[in-house]
Amino acid sequence: MRTAYLGPAGSWTHQAALDLFGEASLVPLARDELFAAYVAGTVEQVCVPVITSIVGLTPYMDAVLDLPAVTVVAEYPQMLGYSLLARPGAAGGYRPSVRASGGAGGNQAVARSCNAARAPH
């Protein structure tokens, strides 16, 4: 079974697809190509994030709900992590306060649109 994931390779969605479905038959695609491939039947499943702890609902939720005959086949909850990096002095002495939510994380549903995200190690 071919599974398209919201590419590129190495993304959180790629990691989720690897963990859920294994490496065989994974296809990295951009958003428009991914949903078009599912509708055309060239892939049987898609893997996209629909909810994250950082942004809440993602811009992919409407596209997932618009797919014909979608069935959620798994959920892949994963805490997302981000790093803010800068060279010394790059912020001109400004030190912003950065806080992360301690929520449950990425609560992504995996459907014939597998929805997921995970930080690569």
Image: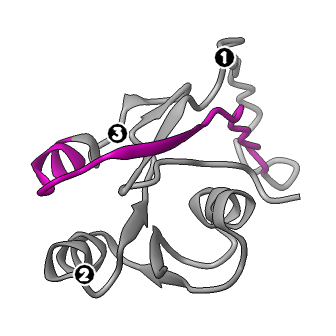
Question: Which region of the structure is painted magenta?
Answer: 62-85
For the residue pair 68 and 49, the one nearer the viewer reads as 68
Looking at the rendered structure, the secondary structure element under dot 1 is: loop
Q: Which tag is nearer the camera, tag 2 or tag 1?
A: 2
Q: Earlier in the sequence, mark 3 or mark 2?
A: 2
Q: Amino acid at mark 3?
A: Thr
Q: Secondary structure at mark 3?
A: loop
Tell me the CA gap for discs 1 and 3: 16 Å
How packed mark 1 is, by other alpha carbons closer than 10 Å (few <14, some 14-19, many 20 or more), is few
Question: Residue at image x 50%, y 74%?
Answer: 7
Whether 8 is drawn above or below 107: the answer is: below
Up-down: is 42 above or below 4?
A: below
Query: Which part of the image, by quadrant, shows the C terminus?
Result: bottom right
Name the residue type under label 1: Ala
Which of the 4 image quarters holds residue 19? bottom right
Residue picked out by circle 1: 104
Dot 3 and dot 2 residues touching (CB under 8 Å): no
| Mark 2 neighbour density, 10 Å: few (under 14) some (14–19) many (20 or more) | some
Residue 93 is one of the magenta-drawn residues: no
Identify the residue at horizontal 66%, vertical 16% (top origin): 104
Which residue in the protein does label 3 denote? 58
- Please tell me the numbered disc located at residue 91: none
- Marks 3 and 1: in contact by CB < 8 Å? no
The reply to whether the magenta stretch includes residue 63 is yes
Residue in view at x 74 percent, y 51 percent:
119
Q: Name the residue tied to disc 2.
A: 37
Q: Position of residue 39 (x, y in %)?
A: 15, 73
